[in-house]
Image: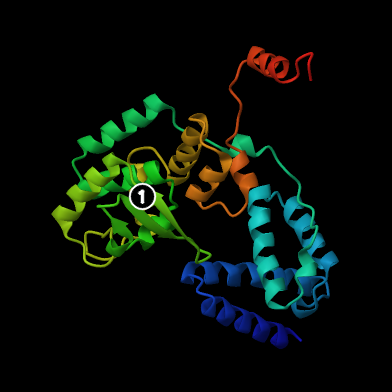
Amino acid sequence: MQGSSSTTIDQFLAWLEHEGKSTNTISTYHQELKKYEKWLLQNDRELIDITHRDVQDYILFLEEKGKSPITTDKILGVIRTFSRYLKRPDITFDIKIKQGNKKEDIETLSKDECEALLSEVRESENERNIAIVYMLLHTGIRVSELCALNTSDINLVTKQVSVSDTHGDQRIIPLSDEVVHYLTDYMEAIQPQEALFLSKSNERLTDRSVQYMLKKFHINAQKLRHTFCQHLIDQGVSLEIVSRLAGHRDINVTKRYAKSRLPETEFEDAIRRTFSKDC
């Protein structure tokens, strides 16, 4: 039966490729399914015969191991996609996941910290790194999305970038004047042909290389992405717009940034204005 399960996984991976999923996404799905298969076999169960109970038990197992709600939810997403492939989506309906305080996971930069970072990056006089940091901070894209960008995805005339996520979905993000300025400087200096951001050896930049570069400025890409979302929310931009710009597949992820900073008196005034004696 194990061989049968392995064949099913291979067929599933081929289906993902046909669906246009990226190599990184397919690799992640493969790794997580193999881990799940191993756990199932240890409990005398088979991947191709999984039930709703098998999925819920695995989620509980992951939580007991100390996996965060975010990580557990991503793993459930893999199993959910696999269940759709099996044409048995009901397997993952109403699976319970413990909800932690996700707001504590969010670290952002203040306006002053942003300016200090950008000033330090500009002083480095490295056109590529300047363009990358501005791009990450002003568009909120993921590192994997940034590294996958081609020159054809950038339109400096309309000031837009077309971004593809790991699920193959595309979104258009407007570019700030500063991003356009520093991207132009970089592209004129380097003259990239296909891949937008290149290494010193003239090859497409990798996720690891970007993360390593950011460490020099004591920052990480996730914090820049959080800052992008938080600053938009703080400026009164709707959750739906922020969700679309960030490429969140679940608006509940975006809601983490909606931390109210209004004083209590404004809440009281809002109630009084809305529910007057005439209502």
User: For mark 1, what is the residue?
Assistant: 212
Image-based side of 11 in relation to 126, left or right: right
Image-based side of 74 in relation to 217, left or right: right
Q: Residue at x 36, y 49 (%)?
A: 212
In this view, 2 is above or below 97 = below
Q: Residue furthest front?
A: 278
Q: Tag 1: residue type? A: Tyr
In this view, 27 is above or below 192 = below
Disc 1, SS: helix
Query: At which x and y percent is residue 141?
Result: 43, 50
Q: Residue at x 25, y 52 (%)?
A: 157
Query: At which x and y percent is residue 95?
Result: 79, 57
Image-based side of 151 in relation to 223, left or right: left
Quarter of the figure that contains the C terminus: top right
Q: Residue at x 69, y 16 (%)?
A: 273
**Label 1 packing within 10 angstroms: few (<14), some (14-19), many (20+):** some
Query: At which x and y percent is residue 257?
Result: 57, 36
Q: Quadrant of residue 57?
A: bottom right
